[in-house]
Amino acid sequence: MRFFAVFSLLALSSCASFFQGSQEKAELHMRIGNSYFAQGNYPLALKELLEAEKLDPKNALVQNNLGLVYFTRERLDLAEKHLRQATRLQENYSEARVNLSRVLIEAKKYKEAEDELNKALSDLTYAGFDRAWFNMGLLRFHQKNWAAAKSAFEKSLQGNRDNCLTNSYYGRSLFELGDYRRAAENLDKAVGFCQKQMFDEPHYYSAVAWYRLDEKDKSVARFQEIVKNYPEGKYREKARAMLDLIRKGVQ
């Protein structure tokens, strides 16, 4: 998920000076909230963005950013509510549609997510096609349509080749298709992109792919790296179990 912190607000029609003042105050609160979000301080980010919403409830960008904060806090219901409001307030707000699609995928509302993504991808002025194609790939991945997921991730990579999640899920799609050699090679690339985020998933699937290829030395090295470098990682215990399995097999 990507948070779009500072956008210039669209020019609005002339109105009462009080309303203009409210908009200016709302933008200030939004900027402060976005800054807190970037720092990972989600409670204060939410507080500032809710204040911005009170001052300017028809600001689509505020609604979008509220949706992203709620998504980060795992409140899918509120994230969907605010992102839908953003798209109602600004019909051509393709970025909000892409963000909404991400929420809908997590909520397993796949048909609605696909509809939002198709609208965004049909917008020839939308510059974030790599994010739209990533979400389309994620949607297909959740639907276990591995070939379609692989194709969508390839299109996403055309716009951003260094993205951690895209490279990881592309490699995992190859893995699910049984193309273990290419999966291992691409997951190894993802490992490099994902280390800063402490995201251990490509590490784990790279190790398993090398294991399936019977290249035990590479597999063991990857599993050992998970145990050593990701003490709080999701796949640490699985890596330990695989190391025990491989050692027993060697003996």
Image (cartoon, rainbow, N blue to C red):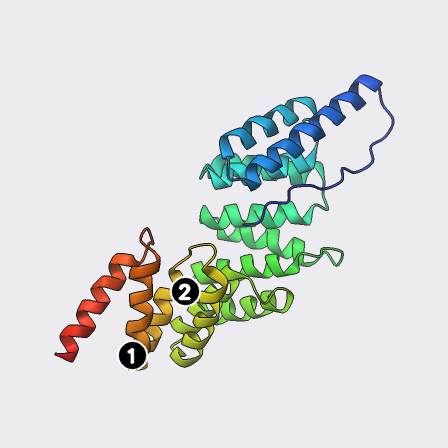
Q: Indicate the secondary structure of the residue bearing disc 1.
A: helix
Q: Residue at x 74, y 22 (%)?
A: 22
Instruction: Give the residue type that dot 1 points to.
Output: Asp
Gap between marks 2 and 1 measured at Cα: 17 Å
Neighbor class of circle 1 (other Cα within 10 Å; few <14, some 14-19, many 20+) is few
The disc label shown at residue 202, or none: 2
Q: Is residue 160 left or right of residue 164?
A: right
Let me know if residue 234 appears in the view: yes
Q: Earlier in the sequence, mark 2 or mark 1?
A: 2
Neighbor class of circle 2 (other Cα within 10 Å; few <14, some 14-19, many 20+) is many
Quadrant of the frame with the C terminus: bottom left
Q: Indicate the secondary structure of the residue bearing disc 2.
A: helix
Quarter holding residue 122:
bottom right
Q: Nearer the viewer, residue 220 or 183?
A: 220
Quarter holding residue 153:
bottom right
The extreme left residue here reads 251
Q: Nearer the viewer, residue 77 or 158?
A: 158
| Residue 242 at x, y percent in the picture | 23, 67
Q: Which residue is mark 1?
A: 217
